[in-house]
Amino acid sequence: MIYKKKIFASEEVKGEDFESVTFISCKFIEINIKFAGFTKCKFQSCNFSGAIFESSFFTNCTFPDTNLGNLDFSEIDIKSCDFKGAFLENSIFQKLKSGKTGERKPLDLTSNKFEAANLTGTLFVMCNLKGISFVGSSLEGAIFERCNLNGSDFSEANINGVNFENSNTKGAYLDINGFLSFGSSKGFKIK
């Protein structure tokens, strides 16, 4: 099934399972996406601005040129998704403990792809990103708080101003430009 330029309302997605559906230039703007599942779906040039998710999931989905900015992913299970070309600025990847306001638990994102994604200002909290490729991504001002980035690849990524607060970066890869950019953003100067 293919949806083109459709503007979705909350009641059209609530409790629905979408499988192998292509969404082209569709809008999910400021709606509640509750108990919805998306499996093997493609979101091409879609817009999720202001959407609020509750107990939903994305499995084996792609998001080229899709706006997923300013979203809280704490109520979304994400598995084997490809965010290449997606706009995820100022979003939050975290998992909250049920019934405990503000308490977080680990979130495994190792099956997902974040190459060439715009992750400017995005916050990752207690995420397992071991071995993830961020090649060619924009991560300017992103925050990785207590994340596992062991073996992750930041080659050709813009990491200016990135904060790796209490994160495991052992074995993470930077190219020379990334190394210089990161050092410069921390106040280091080349002599």
Image (cartoon, grey):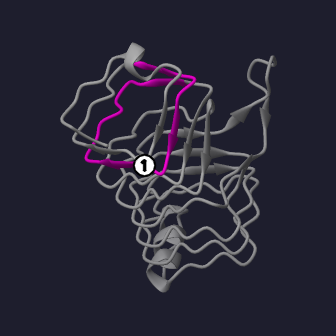
Q: For this view, does 23 lie left or right of residue 113?
A: left
Q: Name the spot of residue 8 as percent of width and height, x first.
A: 30, 23
Nearer to the camera, 161 or 155: 155
Give above or below for 76 relative to 16.
Answer: below
Q: Is residue 74 magenta?
A: no
- What is the three-letter code of the residue carrying label 1? Ser
Q: Measuring from the top left, give residue 119's x and y in whole percent.
A: 44, 52
SS at mark 1 in the image: loop
From this view, report whether residue 136 is shown above or below residue 31. Answer: below
Magenta span? 31-53
Residue at coordinates 43% horizontally, 34% vertically from top-left?
70
**Place of residue 114 in the rendered image (x, y in percent of width and height, measured from the top left):** 50, 61
- In which quarter of the view is residue 117 placed? bottom left
**Furthest residue to the front?**
1
Q: How many marks?
A: 1
Q: Is 43 contained in the magenta span?
A: yes
Left or right: residue 42 compared with residue 178: left
